[in-house]
Image: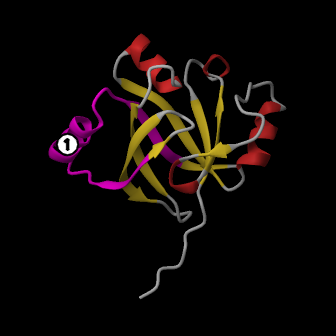
Amino acid sequence: MLTRIDHIGIACHDLDATVEFYRATYGFEVFHTEVNEEQGVREAMLKINETSDGGASYLQLLEPTREDSAVGKWLAKNGEGVHHIAFGTADVDTDSEEIRGKGVRVLYDEPRRGSMGSRITFLHPKDCHGVLTELVTSAPVEPSEH
């Protein structure tokens, strides 16, 4: 089932300033950046460490690209801070259905595209003790050519 903490999502008003804070304060460097138009965010993934299952743990910094995005609405209501926690899984489809069978609301009928080509879904925070929870299956790692 769930194998690791994949990332902790942090909503912010200014992605560049927030990245600089984590770089200057903790020495974390940006591993990946992208704009996810579907979710209305610009994001930076800061790698914290490798994990025993071949994945990694990250901080995901999220700046909304539009006010009506889920992160934009959340940020307007709550201000900057922890937005969600994401758990890694080898099979987001199977695990989300198993969790749905336990009475937890899964927010997407089918997993969607997430950061770095991953497949994701979210669990309703009211069913998870107030925590928006994401399930993530990382994209396969492409062999590098030397």
- Judged from this view, the residue extending furthest toward the right is 101
Q: Residue at x 27, y 31 (%)?
A: 14
The segment highlighted magenta reads 5-34
Q: Which residue is mark 1?
A: 20
Q: Residue at x 51, y 25 (%)?
A: 69
Horizontal arrangement in the rendering, residue 8 relative to residue 25 (left or right): right
Compare residues 61 and 97 and report the one nearer the observer.
Answer: 61
Secondary element at tag 1: helix
Q: Position of residue 127 (x, y in %)?
A: 67, 20
Q: Position of residue 21 (x, y in %)?
A: 19, 38
Compare residues 39 and 88 and report the one nearer the observer.
Answer: 39
In the rendered view, tell whether residue 51 sits above or below residue 3: below
Compare residues 134 and 44 and report the one nearer the observer.
Answer: 44
Q: Position of residue 83 (x, y in %)?
A: 45, 27
In the rendered view, tell whether residue 96 sits above or below residue 105: below
Q: Residue at x 57, y 37 (%)?
A: 38
Amino acid type indicated by mark 1: Glu
28 in magenta: yes
In the rendered view, tell whether residue 106 sits above or below residue 98: above
Horizontal arrangement in the rendering, residue 54 relative to residue 106 (left or right): left
Q: Position of residue 99 (x, y in %)?
A: 76, 35
